[in-house]
Image (tube, grey):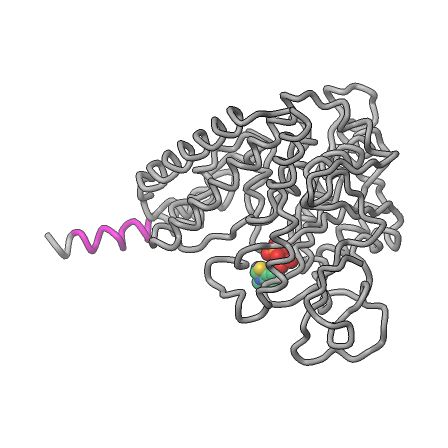
Amino acid sequence: MSDNVVAPLETAFGVDHHVSRATAPENPVRLVQDGGPEMVQLLNPEGERVSHPEHDAVVDALSDEELRGFYRDLVLIRRFDAEATALQRQGELGLWASLLGQEAAQVGSGRALRPQDYAFPTYREHGVAWCRGVDPVNLLGMFRGVNHGGWDPNEKNFHLYTIIIGAQTLHATGYAMGIQRDGAVGTGDDERDAAVIAYFGDGATSQGDVSEALVFAGVNNSPVVFFCQNNQWAISEPNEKQTRAPLWHRARGFGFPGIRVDGNDVLAVYAVTKAALDAARTGQGPTFIEAYTYRMGAHTTSDDPTKYRVSAEVEVWKHRDPIERFKRWLLTTGRADAAFFDATDAESDALGTSVRERCLSMPEPPGTDMFDHVYATPHPVMERERAEFAAYQASFVEAQA
Ligand SMILES: Cc1ncc(C[n+]2csc(CCOP(=O)(O)OP(=O)(O)O)c2C)c(N)n1
C-alpha cells in the first residue's frame, strides 16, 4: 500500500481490494492505492528503473531510438488530446473523451502490436490509433458529427470506436476465433501469425458482454488479449462499486492468465503486452491484462469530475504521471538530451496547429451519408429511405426558391 492516502482507513471504502463485508458508505471517500506488490512495474514514478526478472530482457533490448520513439508518441498524443479538448470547448466538437493520464497504457500496448494484429478499441484509444498509423484528424470526425467513424478499419487493422460498453470484446473474440480457423495462429511464421487485442475500461467488466467474451475466448483458446485500462472510474462510479476482487484475478475463473501492470509505465506495459500477444500468436490462448492507471480529466467533456471525486486523489496521481517519469529516465540515463525534448515539443505544437486547421476544414457531409454503410452491399430498403430523405431535404431548397 502506498503512503499516498487521501482518506483515513476507517472512512475509506474497499480497503485493499475490497474483500471485507463492510457495508459501503453512501458517499465514500476513496483510498488511493498503488496497485499492490503483484503489479508489474519497470519504471517507478521517480523515473528509476525497477528490475523484473521476467520482463527486463525485452525492454533492455529496445534501442535508444525506439525508446525516444515511445516518448515522442506519448507527447504527441497528449498534445493531440489537449487540442481536441480545446476544440470541444470552443464548440467545434460535440463531445470528447480525453485520454489524459492513460498515454503509457495505450502507447505501450499499441507499440507491442504487429501490423497483422487487429485492435478493437472503445472510444478513448486515441494513443493506440496513433500507434496503428490512423490519421488523428480522422478520430475527430465522429465527435464533430461529420461521419460515423472516419477510417477504414481494415486499412490499419484498427476497428471503429465502439460506444456500447464492452461490445467490442465480443467482436474481438469472434475475430480471434476467425483467424484461428483461418490458420493464422501458431504456424511459426512470424509474418503470418496474428493476435487480437480488445480494449475496455474497468466499468466495462460489469457488462455481460465482457464475461461472455472471456468465456468464448477461454474455451476456444483464442488468440485474444483483453486489455483493461483500469482508470479507477466508470463515469462517476468508482472501482469499488464495480468489483470486490482485483480485475486481473478475474481471468483465472475463465481459465487463462491474468496480470496487473502499472499502466503509467510505458516500458512495463510494452513488455507485458508483448508477452501476451506473443503467447496469443503462438497458440497459447488469451491473457487478461489489467493496466492500473488513472483518468486525469473528465470522463468526457460533458461531465464534471469535481462532483464525484476529491481533488486530493487527482493530486496523488499527478505524481505518477506517465510522461514525466519516462522523460526523467531518458534524461538521467543519457538516452535523450535537451535538444531532443525541445524538438519533440516543437513537433507537438505543429501537430496541434495542423489538427486544428484540418478539423475546422472537415467538409460537411451530405445528409444521405448516414445510409451509406448500414449494409455492405446495396439494400432496397436503404435505397428507398435514402431517396425519401433526399427528397425531404430538397423540399426545403425548393420552398426557399
Ligand atoms: C451498454 C452501455 N451501457 C451504458 C453506457 C453509458 N456509458 C458510457 S461510458 C460508461 C462508463 C464506462 O466506464 P469504463 O468502462 O470504466 O470506461 P472509461 O470510460 O472509464 O474508459 C457508461 C456506463 C454505454 N455507453 N453502453
Where are the magenta residues, as a range? Answer: 387-397
Q: Residue visible at 14% across and 57% down?
A: 399
State which image quarter holds ligand 1: bottom right
Disc tally is 0
Q: Residue visible at 57% across and 37% down?
A: 74
Examine the image and state in which quarter residue 174 appears. Answer: top right
Q: Residue visible at 60% across and 58% down?
A: 315
Q: Which residue is situated farthest in the front direction here?
A: 332
| Residue 352 appears in the rendering | yes
Question: Is 12 above or below relative to 262?
Answer: below
Residue 28, position as x, y percentages in the image: 68, 75
Q: Quadrant of the N terminus?
A: bottom right
The kind of secondary structure the magenta stretch mainly shows is helix
Examine the image and state in which quarter residue 231 appears. Answer: bottom right
Q: Residue visible at 38% across and 55% down?
A: 89
Question: Is 386 above or below relative to 237?
Answer: above
Residue 395 relative to residue 286: left or right: left
Residue 187, position as x, y percentages in the image: 83, 22
Q: Nearer the viewer, residue 172 or 108?
A: 108
Q: Nearer the viewer, residue 37 or 106?
A: 37
| Residue 223 appears in the rendering | no
Question: Is 358 above or below relative to 385?
Answer: above
| Residue 332 forms part of the magenta stretch | no
Residue 145 relative to residue 224: left or right: left
Residue 92, position as x, y percentages in the image: 35, 50
Residue 217, position as x, y percentages in the image: 80, 45
